[in-house]
Image (tube, helix red, strand yellow):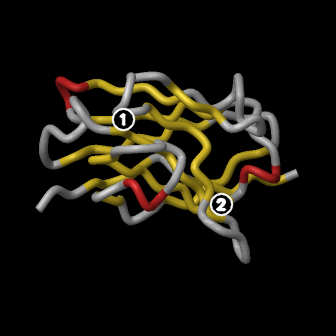
Amino acid sequence: EVQLVESGGGLVQAGGSLRLSCAASGSIFDDYGIGWFRQAPGKEREGFSCISSIDGSTYYADSVKGRLPISVDNAKNTVYLQMSSLKPEDTAVYYCAGGGWGTCSLPKFYDYWGQGTEVTVSS
């Protein structure tokens, strides 16, 4: 069973930066979709930054373009989310997902999920 473990969340002021990491127990990032999702209280889980298994393209939701890029280090089985220019509306629990297929921004297309790490952005 593959496990994903996120780290790097915390409290940050608006305009600040954080880097989230997601370490996998196996090599699941090479040929499959990878995604970062977030869920704010009372809202659905949102896929906002991901790499497609279909053609390797990246997808970014309009709300995060230019601010929350995804990257992957296959040698370390780790995916990163570099967060900058953070806003209070970025406050959420952040999840990484692996083993994906199909549309990379949709949760239903992933087999493996991390436990989540909380990010709080104060104004």
Badge 1 amino acid: Val
Depth check, front residue: 80 or 10:
80
Badge 2 amino acid: Ala
Crowding at dot 2, Cα within 10 Å, few <14 / some 14-19 / many 20+, comes out as many
Left or right: residue 14 versus residue 82 is right
Image spot of residue 57 (x, y percent): 47, 22
Image spot of residue 97 (x, y percent): 38, 51
Q: Name the residue tied to disc 1.
A: 79
Task: Kindly report the distance in space between the C-alpha atoms of the residues bearing marks 1 and 2.
Answer: 19 Å
Q: Secondary structure at mark 2?
A: strand
Depth check, front residue: 70 or 106:
106
Image spot of residue 110 (x, y percent): 35, 55
Tell me which residue sits at (14%, 38%) in the image. Answer: 27
Q: Name the residue tied to disc 2.
A: 92
The earlier-in-sequence mark between 1 and 2 is 1
Tell me which residue sits at (80%, 34%) in the image. Answer: 15
